[in-house]
């Protein structure tokens, strides 16, 4: 392999090892006596053979090829890349948490159950809805839980509904969830102010509709001023109102989904509540619900007895059942609970206020002359925690695509915003700075954007061919999808489907 | 009291000036007063790092964890040894704090890890394609059910009663959404899936059949025979497998299984009271474009340099929306990293050695306990026995710091006196002998 890019499998050399087995202290019975020939593995799985030093170097080297939040600004819209406090890793690793078996008798897991109980209570207060299940594994799992709860709620009333409404600004997970939950997606349009088109909503809301899934503030970063009317229309036809909590970071302590009329809310603990993203998980997607939805919550539920002891309630006759194994991503709960303890009610409110301040400040900086004419704001209103720019000016005036701007940012060591979403904005850039960034970081980002645009006015080719300073440059994604290579050849060898000479 | 924000009074003034707002509250003018909270959140005030540390440590101290007792508890998650290098690598900011690799040029580390993970899972399961992880075991089973629906358009799912109760429950919950019902196939008197009953349960409307290897009781199933019967009418054959015993067991992919899913906790992940861990999802080539979740693929950059990207994204929700093959977005990248590091640490021979050790200790333990076995045939890492005085055993054992295992009664009324005993490499012969002594003592008392 002439590249410096080598997989752990390609580093393997027969006879090397990192693992030494513990003492074989039981009789050495031949395998043939313990396993039938039909179920014995004939050839060992071709795993790498490497020493510990090489193993460590391999993964440390790989890690150095990742940009990460602890390194720099990460304004990825709708992802809430706020600081991950280091305390959380320490408390999550305590043996009482990390080494606790999920089926330990509740009598011997009182600390864990109390932590879950307290987290449930905090989330209920933040959402303004009385009942919480921590079980869903991530936001999209929480969404699915919400629609399964909606289905169970309607079926319990003898109703069968077939449609779910989603705004055209919705996250992709919303319509995907609707299909998985066995409903048909009906799209609702966006009004001129960026909110839900109320007339369109009224037209489409009928007794076939089970639910409206809404993000508020929405994916344009705008708070829907008509939320009460929306709730009235939805409840008027007997449907539930679902809150996608991806954008909850804007409104903690300021307004609560429950008070806006939402029946079901999911939280992204890996966004609002600081679980580190880990390069694509883990997360957790707890849900909070109103009284009428409560009987259907998944099993088990954490309950507290009169004597102050905690237990798991498995006996819930109307429950939708289990969404996954055990009680959910407890390790994530520990971190989010620690975060809530650190900030307290006032700190959470401050976090939301500063998130909104930072977003509006950055929006103002990016509206300045030299930037604003190339990247106009999609909907010119006060934004909440994020905002969406359109790259159409840059496209028309500089022949520069949003993708090029994003790729050039990589050379400036800032992570680009979310690009090409939401879909209704041409060449979209969705920017969410979060509350943990300083004014200097925001100013630096604005300066980077300005310098990229100035550079492109001179020579757009520079950005079009960016990045230059990254471990690899633009990759052939089309080729990767056309001739997928999704596993390596163990122990090296095998044919190279993308020979070096063949450039994309 | 947020110590993670940094707006000074001077900053605030300058920022509001740039925005053209008079106060912070002005920024929230779009929120109608009628839906405002207009009072502080009712939560305890914020605390110092030291106080939070001590509070959490106090809660943790009230849990009896696996170092505080000799535990034979398994039933889906197991107390395996996690090497120190995993703690070290996973705590690196470079792995811990990036988002999903949407910008591949600055995410080659994470993407290559996914690619290596997929390679390792393919090797273990004997199936050519794997994704980069799903949430965990039981929801992975449910995801396989959804794929089978997309693939076959049939209406029924058939599951062995040897499939983990949580997997069966998750399958039922999810299937209620995608409009399918789940039928169960009983176990034989030896605790294995009943082949005849399975053959009888499979019909033209069966979309998928679900097996588990080893099954929930630890029984090594005759997977090939079962898969053949399951596939009789064209159903998708799904096997949930624990990856560690696959060190000695014939890979599901070599026995007619179409999709192999499973819980990845045993591969270098903590117990964490049930999560986060990861699920894996491997399948035959024909399912590649219908798989759920992220998939990393190899490619080249404009200079011809080798690199990795998220690929086949037209399956996914952010591109395909309501036509996506699954709604999953965030999955378990960091936990999957632990998985591939662990498998590389074990290595080709280590995995076999570890699996053989578990196999021998499991059989030793079953014999040492001297109880009536529910599954007397071949078992790996876990086995089920009938205990005449289960409550008594638990009372005595727990007082002595021994956790005898998992009581089967709630999930399997037919094994009301059943005890499921898990033996990992961390349970030594001395530990096993200690449990055996407690069992014998109980039996004497009972007599």
Image: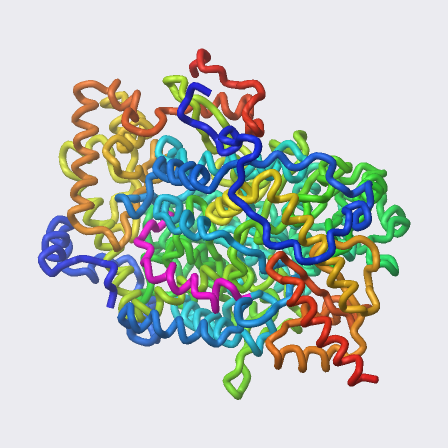
In this view of the protein, which residue sits in the foreground, A210 or A499? Answer: A499
| A185 relative to B161 in the view: left or right | left
Across and down, in percent, residue B446 comes to 80, 84
Q: How is the image coloured?
A: rainbow
Task: Please give the name of the residue rendered at 82% of the width and 41% of the height, measured from the top-left corner.
Answer: A37
Across and down, in percent, residue A501 comes to 44, 11
Across and down, in percent, residue A41 comes to 73, 39
The reply to whether residue A264 is visible in this rendering is: no
Across and down, in percent, residue A247 comes to 37, 54
Looking at the image, how many numbered discs can be counted on the residues?
Answer: 0
Q: Quadrant of the C terminus of chain A?
A: top left
Where, by quadrant of the figure, is residue A421 drawn? top left
Residue A371 belongs to magenta span: no
| A312 relative to A358 in the view: left or right | right
In this view of the protein, which residue sits in the foreground, B106 or B189? Answer: B189
In this view of the protein, which residue sits in the foreground, A155 or B174? Answer: B174
Q: Which residues are magenta?
A: A78-100
| B401 relative to A385 in the view: left or right | right
Residue extending farthest bottom? A307
The reply to whether residue B100 is visible in this rendering is: yes
Task: Please give the name of the residue rendered at 26% of the width and 33% of the height, measured from the top-left corner.
Answer: A409
Residue extending farthest top? A501
Q: Vertically, is B140 above or below A255?
A: above
Task: Please give the name of the residue rendered at 76% of the width and 42% of the height, measured from the top-left corner.
Answer: A40
Residue A89 belongs to magenta span: yes
């Amino acid at each position: 392999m002439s590249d410096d890019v080598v997989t752990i499998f390609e580093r393997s050399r027969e006879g090397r090892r990192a693992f030494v087995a513990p003492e074989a202290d039981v009789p050495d019975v031949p395998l043939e006596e313990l396993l039938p020939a039909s179920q014995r593995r004939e050839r060992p799985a071709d795993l790498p053979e490497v020493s510990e030093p090489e193993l460590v170097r391999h993964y440390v080297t790989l890690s150095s090829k990742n940009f990460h939040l602890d390194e720099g600004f990460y304004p990825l819209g709708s992802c809430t890349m706020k600081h991950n406090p280091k305390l959380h890793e320490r408390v999550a690793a305590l043996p009482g948490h990390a080494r606790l078996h999920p089926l330990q008798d509740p009598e011997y897991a009182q600390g864990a159950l109390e932590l879950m109980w307290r987290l449930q209570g905090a989330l209920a207060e933040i959402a303004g809805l009385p009942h919480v299940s921590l079980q869903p594994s991530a936001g999209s799992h929480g969404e699915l839980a919400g629609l399964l709860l909606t289905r169970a709620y309607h079926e319990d009333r003898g109703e069968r509904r077939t449609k779910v409404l989603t705004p055209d600004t919705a996250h992709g997970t919303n319509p995907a969830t609707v299909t998985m939950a066995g409903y048909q997606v009906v799209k609702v349009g966006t009004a001129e102010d960026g909110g839900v088109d109320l007339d369109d909503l009224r037209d489409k809301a009928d007794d076939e509709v089970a639910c409206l899934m809404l993000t508020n503030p929405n994916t344009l970063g705008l708070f829907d001023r008509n939320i009460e009317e929306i709730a009235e229309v939805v409840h008027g036809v007997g449907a539930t109102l679902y809150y996608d909590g991806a954008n909850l970071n804007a409104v903690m302590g300021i307004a609560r989904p429950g008070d806006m009329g939402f029946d079901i809310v999911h939280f992204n603990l890996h966004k609002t509540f600081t679980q580190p993203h880990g390069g694509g998980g883990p997360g957790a997607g707890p849900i909070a619900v109103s009284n009428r939805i409560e009987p259907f919550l998944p099993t088990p539920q954490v309950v507290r007895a009169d004597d102050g002891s905690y237990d798991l309630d498995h006996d819930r006759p109307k429950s939708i059942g289990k969404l996954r194994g055990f009680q959910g991503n407890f390790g994530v709960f520990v971190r989010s609970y620690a975060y809530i303890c650190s900030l307290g009610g006032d700190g959470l409110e401050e976090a939301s206020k500063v998130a909104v301040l930072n977003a509006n400040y950055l929006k103002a900086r990016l509206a300045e002359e030299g930037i604003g004419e190339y990247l106009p704001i999609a909907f010119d209103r006060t934004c909440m925690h994020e905002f969406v720019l359109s790259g159409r000016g840059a496209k028309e005036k500089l022949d520069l695509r949003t993708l090029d701007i994003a790729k050039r940012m990589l050379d400036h060591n800032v992570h680009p915003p979310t690009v090409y979403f939401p879909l209704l904005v041409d060449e979209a850039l969705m920017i969410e700075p979060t509350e943990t960034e300083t004014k200097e970081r925001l100013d630096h980002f604005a300066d980077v954007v300005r310098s990229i645009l100035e550079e492109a006015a001179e020579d757009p080719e520079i950005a079009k061919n960016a990045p230059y300073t990254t471990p690899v440059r633009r990759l052939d994604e089309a080729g990767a999808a056309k001739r997928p290579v999704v596993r390596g050849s163990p122990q090296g060898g095998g044919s190279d489907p993308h020979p070096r000479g063949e450039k994309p | 009291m947020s110590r993670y924000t940094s707006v000074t009074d001077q900053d605030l003034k300058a920022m509001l000036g740039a925005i053209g707002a008079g106060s912070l509250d002005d920024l929230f003018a779009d929120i109608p007063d009628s839906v405002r909270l207009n009072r502080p959140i009712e939560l305890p005030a914020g605390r110092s790092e030291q106080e939070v540390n001590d509070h959490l440590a106090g809660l943790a101290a009230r849990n009896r964890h696996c170092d505080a007792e000799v535990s034979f508890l398994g039933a889906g998650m197991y107390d395996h040894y996690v090497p120190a290098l995993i703690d070290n690598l996973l705590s690196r900011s470079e792995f811990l704090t990036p988002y999903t690799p949407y910008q591949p040029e600055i995410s080659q580390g994470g993407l290559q890890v996914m690619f290596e993970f997929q390679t390792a899972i393919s090797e273990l399961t004997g199936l050519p394609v794997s994704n980069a992880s799903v949430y965990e075991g039981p929801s992975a089973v449910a995801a396989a059910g959804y794929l089978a629906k997309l693939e076959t358009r049939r209406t029924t799912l058939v599951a062995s009663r040897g499939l983990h109760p949580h997997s069966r429950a998750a399958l039922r919950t999810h299937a209620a959404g995608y409009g399918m019902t789940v039928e169960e196939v009983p176990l034989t008197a030896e605790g294995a899936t009943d082949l005849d009953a399975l053959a009888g349960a499979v019909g033209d409307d069966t979309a998928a059949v679900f097996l588990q290897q080893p099954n929930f009781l630890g029984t090594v199933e005759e997977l090939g025979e079962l898969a053949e019967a399951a596939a009789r009418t064209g159903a998708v054959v799904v096997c949930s497998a624990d990856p560690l015993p696959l060190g000695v067991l014939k890979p599901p992919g070599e026995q007619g299984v179409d999709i192999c899913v499973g819980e990845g906790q045993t591969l270098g992940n903590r117990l964490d009271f049930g999560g986060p861990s990861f699920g894996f999802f491997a399948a035959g080539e024909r399912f590649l474009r219908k798989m759920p979740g992220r998939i990393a693929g190899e490619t080249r950059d404009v200079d011809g340099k080798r690199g990795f990207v998220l690929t086949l994204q037209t399956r996914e929700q952010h591109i395909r929306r309501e036509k996506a093959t699954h709604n999953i977005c965030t999955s378990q990248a960091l936990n999957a990293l632990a998985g591939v590091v662990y498998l590389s640490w074990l290595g080709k021979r280590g995995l076999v050695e570890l699996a053989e050790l578990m196999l021998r200790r499991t059989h030793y333990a079953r014999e040492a306990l001297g109880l009536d076995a529910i599954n007397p045939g071949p078992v790996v890492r876990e086995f089920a026995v009938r205990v005449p005085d289960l409550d008594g055993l638990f009372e005595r054992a727990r007082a002595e710091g021994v956790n005898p295992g998992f009581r089967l009664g709630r999930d399997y009324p037919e094994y009301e006196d059943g005890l499921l005993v898990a033996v990992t490499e961390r349970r030594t012969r001395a530990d096993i002998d200690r449990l055996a002594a407690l069992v014998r003592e109980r039996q004497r008392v009972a007599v």
